[in-house]
Image (tube, rainbow, N blue to C red):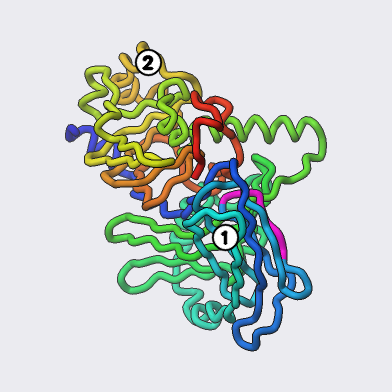
Amino acid sequence: MNTYYRKEIFRKNMLVIACILFIIPALMAQQVIKGRITDAVDGTPVPGASIFIGNTTRGTISDDMGNYSITVSANGSFEIVVSHVGFKSNIHKFNTPQSVHQHDVALGINELQEVVVVARSNHRRSDVNLFWTKFLGEKPSKNGMEVLNRDKIFFHLNSNKIFRASCSEPIEIINHYMGYRIKFTLSSFQHDYEIDETLIEGMPYFEELTPKDNRQKISWEKKRREVYATSITHFFRAFYGDRVHEEGFFLTTMNDMRSGQAVTFAGIKQPGEDMIQANIDFPMLLMCYSIPVTPQVIKGSYSDFIQGKTYPIAIELRPQQITIFPDGSYSGNLRMQEVRGYIFGLSSMLPVEYGGFSNSRKSFQDFIIK
């Protein structure tokens, strides 16, 4: 990778470790999760607790006796979130598929607010702006990404230049661009200014809004298609189905790009049962188009990239090992660095059900979905 590339292209970009745990399977087999939500202190039932499958639109609430039942169309691992105001949220991963899971949860009292309230003012405006940029992808606004409970989020910058954000309840967001209400259970947000790394852990739950008219419905769907076209979920689905170029992506290195060559996937992909292991041993560039990538596009990619042309989104995939599943979900810490455009943040995220497998080369019957 040449000096110009390092100094001019990556100079102002910050590394994000995308550890948002969207390890959710695609839609195929059904599993039922049922149980009872109680107070860990006295064992009494907790009615009205929110229960959802992470990164999906599938959710429910506990009844007057704390009981609940939820069905997930999945044939593999998934994560379930239980939350209630005043209690500490509980996130649990199911690794072994079975038709019925019994999952009782005793919620503990949330002591977060008492711990951080003293340090609430120990931060700068620039720190808060950084949080919104990394978390939402932009600053909150009433016509864009509207945050309904901003006053519940606490910020703290310590003496080691570690900036943290926390929230005692799910952060509620209205995505006015795409028509979703999002409840995000934030487990951890941490930015290290010394090394410019951001770690985000948490789970979103999506609820579709009802459009006020057909014009708004069309606008929302158009925006959803645009976001999905260049999304990591779409790339992983294409990567799994051997349709990277057809689906509008180009994975390469700077040296390969100069000669108009794409990366040979044989050295990266290790197929396994119902998944693919991706081994990235050196930095790679991922170019995200909205149209199929042709040989002509690849041939002129280097000059266009240096001149800032053509690419709507360009990111660097750092050395890492992750496991990719047919629906586009993954396990492991996804390490990415922005190069051009923006792909992180809730403003660029859709529920895992969106997009389906309509463009995939293989059919549902060809997959044993995780």
Q: Is residue 57 magenta?
A: yes
Q: In this orientation, which residue lies closer to the viewer: 272 or 23?
A: 272
Identify the residue position indicated by label 2 in the image: 297
Circle 2 SS class: helix
Most extreme residue toward the top, as rendered?
A: 296
* Residue 265 screen position, x and y as percent: 30, 29
> Residue at coordinates 55% horizontally, 31% vertically from top-left?
365
> Residue at coordinates 59% horizontally, 67% vertically from top-left?
103
* Residue 48 screen position, x and y as percent: 73, 69
Q: In this orientation, which residue lies closer to the viewer: 224 or 24?
A: 24
Q: Where does the magenta region start and end?
A: 55-61
The amino acid sitting under disc 2 is Val
Distance Cα–Cα, label 1 vs label 2: 42 Å
Say which of marks 1 and 2 sits in front: 1
* Residue 35 screen position, x and y as percent: 65, 68
Q: Quadrant of the N terminus?
A: top left
Q: In this orientation, which residue lies closer to the viewer: 14 or 50?
A: 50
Kindly tell me whether residue 93 is visible in this rendering. Answer: yes
In the picture shown, does residue 94 fall above or below 228? below
Q: Is residue 311 left or right of residue 41?
A: left
Circle 1 SS class: strand
The amino acid sitting under disc 1 is Ile
Identify the residue position indicated by label 1 in the image: 80
> Could you say which quadrant of the image residue 53 lies in?
bottom right
Q: Is residue 306 magenta?
A: no
Kindly tell me whether residue 350 is visible in this rendering. Answer: no
